[in-house]
Structure formats: C-alpha cells, structure tokens
Amino acid sequence: MTDTQAPRVLGTFLEAIRIDSPAGEEARFAAWCADRLRAVGCSVRIDETGPASGSDSGNLIAELPGALPGTVVVLCAHMDTVQPGRGITPVVEGGIVRSSGDTVLGADDKAGIAAILEALQRVAEQGIETAPVRVLLTTGEELGLQGAKAISPDDCTGDVCLVLDAHEPVGGIVGAAPTQYTFDAVFTGVPAHAGVEPEKGRSALIMAAKAVCGMRLGRLDDATTSNVGEIRGGGATNIITASCTMRGECRSLDPAMAEAVREEMDAEMQAAAREGGGSVEVRWSKEYEGFRYAADDPRILLVADACRDIGVVPHVFETGGGSDANVLTAKGLPSIVLSCGMTDVHSCGESIAVADLTALSDLLVAVLRRAASK
Ligand SMILES: [Zn+2]
C-alpha cells in the first residue's frame, strides 16, 4: 500500500499510537484527542476524576451538537494502553499494522479512538446531519476500569453507548457480559520451628492450599468461570507459615450464579482455615455488574442494521470479559461493546488490519446516520 492509497484513519491511528499513554499517564494523549475533537466542532472537557482514578488526566467528555432529533449515541473508547507500551514504533505491512515487536501496538484501544475521530471528521466534511453525538474517552481502563468507575453519573447520559473495545473483526456486537467478583484473603495460622516443634504450628499455607483444592475452578458452565490467581506466603523452609495471602475471582453471565460461586469459594476458605486450626479474612469486591441485551433490543438492532448498511454481517456474541460498558451500564447509560478487529491484545504480537480501521469508521458513520430521525 502506498501512502497515496492509505486511508486517512490509518494516519490518525499511527499518530495516536506514537503518543505514549500507559495507564495513569493519559494527559498528553488526552490533549491530542481534545484538539482533534474541537477541530471537528465538538465541545470538549476533561472531568475532575484524575486524582480519584490514579491518573494525570480525567476522562475526556465531548459533544457534537447535532441539529436533528433521534437517538443520542455515545462513542466510547479508553485512552490508556498496557505495558510494554512506551515508544511504540508501528510497522505497516500487507495491510496489517503491528508494533516493531518489543511493545504492544495499542490498537487496544486507539483503534477505537482513531475510528471515532475519522467518523466525526467525515460527518463534519460531508455535512451529514445527525442527532447530538457524545464522545467519552476514559482513563485507567486497564487498571480495573478506573476512569469509568470514577465518572459522575451526570456525565453518563445518552440513549446508547458504543464501547469500541472488543476483539474479532468489525461486525461483532457483544450482547452480554459477566458480573465479576474478586477477593483478597489472608489466612492466619501459628508459627513454629518446623524441625523442633512442628506440632505447635498451624500452617496458613496448608489452609490456603486446601481451600484451593476444595474449590471448583476454571470453566464451571457455559456462563461461569472462577480462578485463584495468586498465593503468597512464607519465607523459610524451617518455619511453619503463619500468614498466607490469596487472590482470586469468579464471574458469570448469570448474576445469581456469580453470587452462588462467590459464596461457595468463600465457604471453602472458611472451612479450610477452621480445619487447619487458624482463621481467614476474606475481602470481596464486586468489580462490575453484568449486562445482557435481547436479540431484538432496538439498540442491538441499530448497530446490526448499520453493519448491513456497510456490507458487514453482524454477529452478536457473549463475552467473559468486563469493560467500561459494564460500569457505564450500571450507571444508567446502556452500553454495548463492538468489535474493532484488534488481535492478540496485551501482547507484543498485537495487530490490526487497516481494513478493520476503515470498516469501523464506516460503521460509526452508518450508526450516526441511522440514529438521526428526520
Ligand atoms: Zn481495551
């Protein structure tokens, strides 16, 4: 592909990923996005959530004042990227964009941002009449949806929010996402010399191990998973371990099932501690609420029809992953996640096809056309 044939959205994308924005350090990239959005006629502000979400920037909130009534669409993507994500050097070859191999690419989630900018640029240039369009670019998504969690519900307004943050080729529509719980547990036993008087000891490490062995882990059913991700404890071979920490999670597309598995995992930890002659303190957090849309939900149909407008077959699927969409939906802004075409995210092999960047931009324009009622 020569430069003259390269679509503009590719240039925007390459510019975006060259601006470092690891989670917590989004300010410089937010300023770049703000300039681009103002240039196409948006009002833009950065909210006050920076300190609360551990970032040098707040979320970016923008609005394009549309002249027509209709469905108010919010276009959402996150500004932060995972590590290693500094000094990204993109390589474009055979219609695919990759990093030079020692960093992520940052298509997660700058593919979404490039497509939003391209779509609004086209709306401005072509004089496409739309209903008001809002843009929400969040911080700290990769740190646990921090920006979205901190955002004021007053800034979560609109009829439907399209979160541009899923893998799979453009046309994918995430119609359901899980409820997730995480836990931090501390097992406490009694220390003793392991060679001299082990009888006096109560091993916190054994309690944790028995708890793990008693839990159902992995994929529990079509909709439910659970995992223990970390165990730490002990420091010497000759000491019965007095303290051991453990972290894990469970999630399910069925909120009642997520709660049932949470209770089950908790009970295993309590029983293992009791049987081991110690105690355990478990702190559970509900990380986010799940959501599920009916196949004929008008918001799903809006996106599916727009897919057909651009010659793409829509594909509604369920995900086991959480995103800003979970948090925003719980705050009252119904949100759907759309596929952007990025592959192998969170790895140095991350890539995206130029065709997907273009298709995603086309899709957003098609959605905005359909959302406007004359
Ligand atoms: Zn992402």
Image: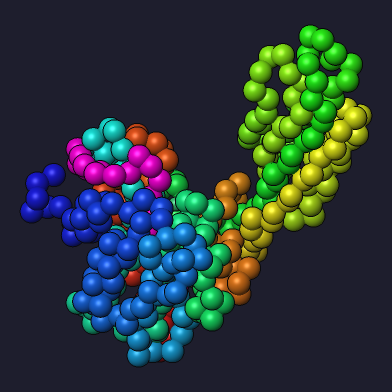
Q: Is residue 264 magenta?
A: no
Q: Residue at 47%, 59% (x, y): give it.
A: 54
Figure colour scheme? rainbow
Q: Is residue 319 left or right of residue 88?
A: right
* Quadrant assignment for the C terminus: bottom left
Measuring from the top left, give residue 279's x and y in whole percent.
85, 37
Measuring from the top left, give residue 271's x and y in whole percent.
89, 35
Q: Residue at 79%, 9% (x, y): give it.
A: 195
* Quadrant assignment for the N terminus: top left
Q: Residue 118's image quarter?
A: bottom left
For the question of whether residue 78 can be seen, the reply is no
The one of 249 and 320 positioned closer to us in this rendering: 249
Q: Is residue 336 left or right of residue 100?
A: right
Q: Is residue 337 left or right of residue 108?
A: right
Q: Residue at 33%, 70% (x, y): give it.
A: 365
For the question of whether residue 59 can be seen, the reply is yes
Measuring from the top left, give residue 286's x and y in whole percent.
69, 56
The one of 301 and 87 positioned closer to us in this rendering: 87
Q: In the rendered image of this protein, does residue 146 appear above or below residue 36?
A: above
Q: Residue at 53%, 68% (x, y): give it.
A: 150
Q: In the rendered image of this protein, does residue 272 appear above or below residue 365?
A: above
Q: Is residue 90 magenta?
A: yes
Q: Single out the residue that lies furthest toward the top.
A: 195
Magenta stretch?
A: 74-93
The one of 65 and 217 positioned closer to us in this rendering: 217
Measuring from the top left, give residue 190's x and y in whole percent.
82, 28
Number of marks drawn: 0
Q: In the rendered image of this protein, does residue 241 appear above or below residue 133?
A: above
